[in-house]
Amino acid sequence: MATIKDIQEQIVEEFAVFDNWMDKYQYIIDLGKALPVIEESSKTEENLIKGCQSRVWLSCKEKDGLLYFTADSDAIITKGIISLLIRVYDGHSADEILAAEPEFIEQIGLKANLSPTRANGLLSMIKQIKLYALAYSQKESGAQNKEPEIATEAKLYPADELQKNIVRALKQVYDPEISVNVYDLGLIYEIKITPPAGEAAGFEVFIKMTMTSPTCPLADDVIADVESAVSDVPGVKGVKIELVFEPAWDDSRMSEEAKLELGLL
């Protein structure tokens, strides 16, 4: 079976035959038309991806340890884009999906040739795929881990995994202007986890974070995405976010991976 890396290389080769972006857009449209039809029962509010200008439904099912995706959209170009993402990630394990970034997006020039709203929608699609993988990965590790379990409703997840899983969730939230995840960008100043008392159903998580600029026009959207991502981590009962601008953010807070990605190293 082809690896995620192999599939991305195939996509890059396919797009290399086109000389201009009008032809590439037409190819994306054709891919969207060829996307298998999603079951109508999967077109639910729960499967609707938040953050996309057009409506996009994404469903995920697990079989024999591998994840399989189906999707649909009411916008044909968006449908083509999600078909590319499904082609890359479909039929792979949760850990493989979490470990692999969609590098083909930069390599074929897709990101640079999308409108800001479509680019944000693309990030939302990637985020949702990763969140599905994160949920299945946590479920699998919880079922196999023999350590004491935390007091969650499902009672599946060991306490010492929670911090790691919160960080993994934060790494699926991207700054829409810089396109680096908020954790590696250094926007997260503090993560505080309060254990449940007695038979409480889960942990309370406090996050202190900032923006690259106090005038960031998308601050509310980023905060909402952080809250949503952390809230989806099993074991988390509630999330409180404090936005601060002291100390001020600068690029010294970025991880080496983020600096490499932005060409600062």
Image (tube, rainbow, N blue to C red):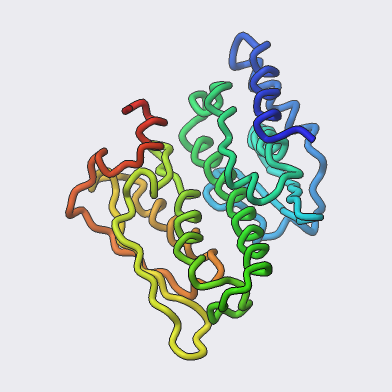
The residue lying toward the viewer, choosing from 102 and 259, is 259
> In the displayed structure, would residue 25 be above or below residue 33?
above
Q: Residue at x 71, y 34 (%)?
A: 3
Question: Which quadrant of the view contains residue 238?
Answer: bottom left
> In the displayed structure, would residue 231 be above or below residue 194?
above
Q: Residue at x 41, y 52 (%)?
A: 221
Q: Residue at x 68, y 11 (%)?
A: 17
Question: Which quadrant of the view contains residue 152?
Answer: bottom right
The residue lying toward the viewer, choosing from 193 and 112, is 193
User: Residue most toward the front?
Assistant: 146
User: Residue most toward the top?
Assistant: 19
Which image quadrant: the C terminus?
top left
Question: Can you give x and y, in whole percent of width and height, for residue 23 in the image?
Answer: 66, 15
Which image quadrant: the N terminus?
top right
Question: Can you give x and y, in whole percent of width and height, for residue 199 in the image?
Answer: 52, 89
> In the displayed structure, would residue 72 be above or below residue 15?
below
Q: How many callouts does the rendering have? A: 0
Q: Is residue 20 left or right of residue 213?
A: right
> In the displayed structure, would residue 238 be above or below residue 22?
below
The residue lying toward the viewer, choosing from 73 and 93, is 93
Q: Is residue 243 left or right of residue 155?
A: left
Q: Residue at x 48, y 25 (%)?
A: 112
Question: Can you give x and y, in whole percent of width and height, for residue 262 in the image?
Answer: 37, 29
Question: Can you give x and y, in whole percent of width and height, for residue 158 in the image?
Answer: 55, 72
Q: Is residue 171 left or right of residue 220?
A: right
